[in-house]
Amino acid sequence: MTVSSLRKEGFKVKVTHRRYWQDPIFRTPLNKTPTALFEEDDYIYSDFASPRGGETQVELEKDGIRVVGVSKCSKKDGYNKKRGVQIAIGRALSQLPERFV
């Protein structure tokens, strides 16, 4: 399943990507800001996204039913948006009632 195919089937789809951010010169984690989405100290906003780690969240909604699928990438692995979306979609679809599948 893809985002476009889900939308064609009548689902509202929201995809959110979150990344780890680093100082671009020293490649060290930056201080956490109040708007950070994760509890880890090095997961914050800056101008340099780390190529390692991250999270993708897919929210599906149809006929008043809403499910969320999440895919997390280890800090040791390279972040891949496309793969993250595929995994998160699969996890969200597994939570849907059978009448939607």
Image (cartoon, grey):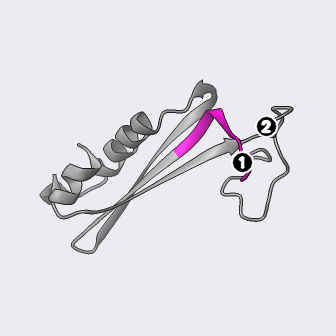
The residue type indicated by label 2 comes to Pro
Instruction: Indicate the position of residue 9 as horizontal and vertical percent values.
Output: 15, 58
Magenta residues, as a range? 43-55
Q: Is residue 24 above or below residue 10?
A: above
Please tell me which residue is depicted at 46% across the width and 51% down the height of the picture. 57
Packing grade of label 2 (10 A; few <14, some 14-19, many >=20) is some
Dividing the picture into quadrants, the one containing residue 15 is bottom left
Residue 66: mark in rendering: none
Residue at numbered disc 2: 24
Residue 47: mark in rendering: 1
Instruction: Indicate the position of residue 5 as horizontal and vertical percent values.
Output: 19, 50
Circles 2, 1 touching at the beta carbon (< 8 Å)? yes
The residue type indicated by label 1 comes to Asp
Instruction: Indicate the position of residue 90 as horizontal and vertical percent values.
Output: 32, 42
Instruction: Indicate the secondary structure of the residue bearing disc 1.
Output: loop
Magenta region includes residue 87: no
Instruction: Indicate the position of residue 30 as horizontal and vertical percent values.
Output: 83, 45
The one nearer the camera, 77 or 69, is 77
The one nearer the camera, 25 or 13, is 25
Q: Is residue 54 above or below residue 59?
A: above
Question: How many dots with numbers?
Answer: 2
Instruction: Indicate the secondary structure of the residue bearing disc 2.
Output: loop
Packing grade of label 1 (10 A; few <14, some 14-19, many >=20) is few
Please tell me which residue is depicted at 71% across the width and 53% down the height of the picture. 45
Q: Quick one: label 2 or label 1, which is nearer the N terminus?
A: 2
Please tell me which residue is depicted at 71% across the width and 58% down the height of the picture. 36
Q: CA distance from mark 2 to mark 1?
A: 8 Å
Magenta region includes residue 49: yes
| Quarter containing the N terminus | top left
Dividing the picture into quadrants, the one containing residue 91 is top left
